[in-house]
Image: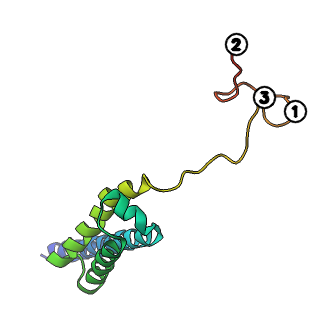
């Protein structure tokens, strides 16, 4: 009987630890969504047709507050996780379409190889000359 009590005790500790880690992951998800919404331009939200920046900032801030105060084991905590997940899975990809494009900072010319005057360089997919 003593062994079963110990197994139940340690199993309860393991479940509690896993639950705390899930709550921390849920808060991390909310913080990620809030930080991402803060860094986006407000005109991109309108262009993507995904409400406004203020709306998503409010939703993500409230979801973090609910998760911190109530935990993810309540119905409101679950709604907070879902709200952050909706932002990251639906709104964020739509906003990435309107983000600026990064351009290469260096130009490679055909025959220049690796920048050492043409020594030791091969032809890459961008180093081609028509007719070769």
User: Position of 94 compared to 11: left or right?
Assistant: right
User: Position of 3 compared to 93: left or right?
Assistant: left
Secondary structure beneath dot 1 equals loop
User: Position of 39 compared to 56: left or right?
Assistant: right
Does residue 48 sit above or below 38 in this rendering?
above
Q: Read off the residue under disc 3.
A: 121
Mark drawn on residue 37: none
Secondary structure beneath dot 2 equals loop
Q: Quadrant of the C terminus?
A: top right
Viewer-nearest of labels 1 and 3? 1
Q: Residue placed at 78% from the left, 35% from the top?
A: 114
Which of 41 and 92 lies nearest the eye of the viewer?
Answer: 41
Residue 74: tell me if it is visible. Answer: no
Does residue 51 sit above or below 124 in this rendering?
below
Q: Read off the residue under disc 1.
A: 117
Q: Residue placed at 42% from the left, 52% from the top?
A: 97
Looking at the image, the residue that sits furthest to the right is 117
Q: Mark 1 to mark 3: distance in Å?
A: 9 Å
Q: Read off the residue under disc 2.
A: 131
Question: Residue 123: where, in percent of width, then height?
Answer: 71, 24
Q: Residue placed at 15% from the left, 72% from the top?
A: 4
Question: Residue 65: where, in percent of width, then height?
Answer: 30, 83
Q: Quadrant of the N terminus?
A: bottom left
Contact flag, marks 1 and 2 (Cβ < 8 Å): no
Sequence-first disc among 3 and 2? 3
Viewer-nearest of labels 1 and 2? 2
Its colouring scheme is: rainbow
């Amino acid at each position: 009987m003593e062994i079963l009590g110990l197994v139940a005790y340690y199993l309860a500790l393991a479940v509690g630890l896993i639950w705390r880690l899930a709550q921390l992951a849920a808060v991390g998800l909310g913080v990620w969504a809030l930080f991402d919404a803060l860094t986006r331009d407000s005109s991109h939200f309108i262009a993507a047709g995904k409400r406004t920046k203020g709306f998503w900032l409010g939703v993500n801030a409230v979801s973090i507050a609910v998760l911190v105060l109530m935990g993810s084991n309540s119905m409101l905590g679950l709604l907070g996780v879902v709200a952050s997940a909706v932002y990251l899975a639906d709104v964020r990809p739509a906003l990435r379409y309107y983000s600026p494009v990064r351009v290469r900072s260096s130009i490679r010319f055909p025959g220049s190889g690796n920048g050492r005057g043409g020594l030791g360089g091969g032809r890459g997919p961008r180093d081609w000359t028509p007719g070769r």
